[in-house]
Image (spheres, helix red, strand yellow):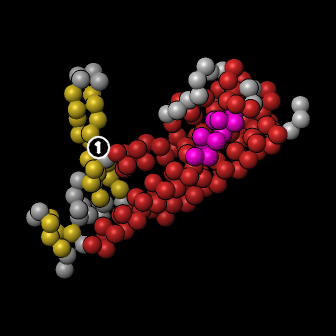
Amino acid sequence: MGNELGGTEFKQEELDELYKAVGFIVVQWGLAEQSLDCIVANLYQNLGGNSLRKRLPKMLTDKLKYVGECLSELPEIHTLKTEGESLVLKFKGFSSNRHNLIHGALGNLALEQGVFRFSKLDIDKEHDIHVVRDVFFDPKDFPEIAKYLTDLGNQAATFGHKLLEFADSPE
């Protein structure tokens, strides 16, 4: 038998699995994005990327765009272009899912037809109003998500180390 909170019956085991999954997503994404930050810093400070921008990019979308620009414009790292573009695509492939889960609010403590519903508050820029959008998380997808994010973190760290080798090598 489940618990009851505010009229909603829920199973603590299901919530625990959700918290475990979302926690993993937060931690693993943080590791991957920290590697991305190191990549951006190295490109900017050591590999000529400061010629492309006056300021270091800070937001994820801008960092990914900047890495793409560096891969296209900096001849010093041309041999890493394909690998770097793959990394950028991998970040883009999960960024909106992560954003929706992390910045959404759990809409119900219980599974609804096998999934958790999150409510995400967005701004409709055209009408200058807030709108609510539902986002769904299926616990059955977690093993695939965990693999994706682990691979992303590994790929980002590996790419970052390769860039360090370029920065450390004599001209």
Q: Tell me where residue 98 appears, x and y as whole percent.
A: 43, 48
Q: Residues within 10 Å of mark 1 (few under 14, many from 20)?
A: many
Residue at figure coordinates x 79%, y 26% from the top left = 75
Question: From the viewer's perspective, is residue 98 above or below residue 20?
Answer: above
Residue 100: where, in percent of width, then height? 37, 45
What's the magenta region? 34-43
- Above or below, 85 against 111 in this view is above
Residue located at (24% from left, 23% from top): 128
Q: Quadrant of the C terminus?
A: top right
Q: Is residue 144 visible?
A: no
Q: Position of residue 86 (x, y in %)?
A: 65, 42
Residue 39 at what x, y percent from top left?
Answer: 66, 39
| Residue that carries the numbered disc 1 in the rendered image | 120
What count of labels does the image hold? 1
SS class, disc 1: strand
Q: Residue furthest right?
A: 170
Asked where in the image residue 121 lies, by quadrant, the reply is top left
Query: Quadrant of residue 18 in the image?
Result: bottom left
Q: Quadrant of residue 149?
A: bottom right
Residue found at x 62% / y 21%: 53
The majority secondary structure of the magenta stretch comes to helix
Question: Which residue is found at the position 80% from the left and 30% from the top?
Answer: 76
**In the displayed structure, would residue 54 be above or below residue 103?**
above
Residue type pointed to by label 1 = Lys
The image quadrant where one finds the N terminus is bottom left
Residue 131 visible, this angle: yes
Query: Does the magenta segment cover residue 38?
Result: yes
Q: 69 or 140, which lies in front? A: 69
Magenta residue check for 117: no
Is residue 12 shown left or right of residue 69?
Answer: left
Considering every residue shown, the one lying at the far bottom of the view is 1
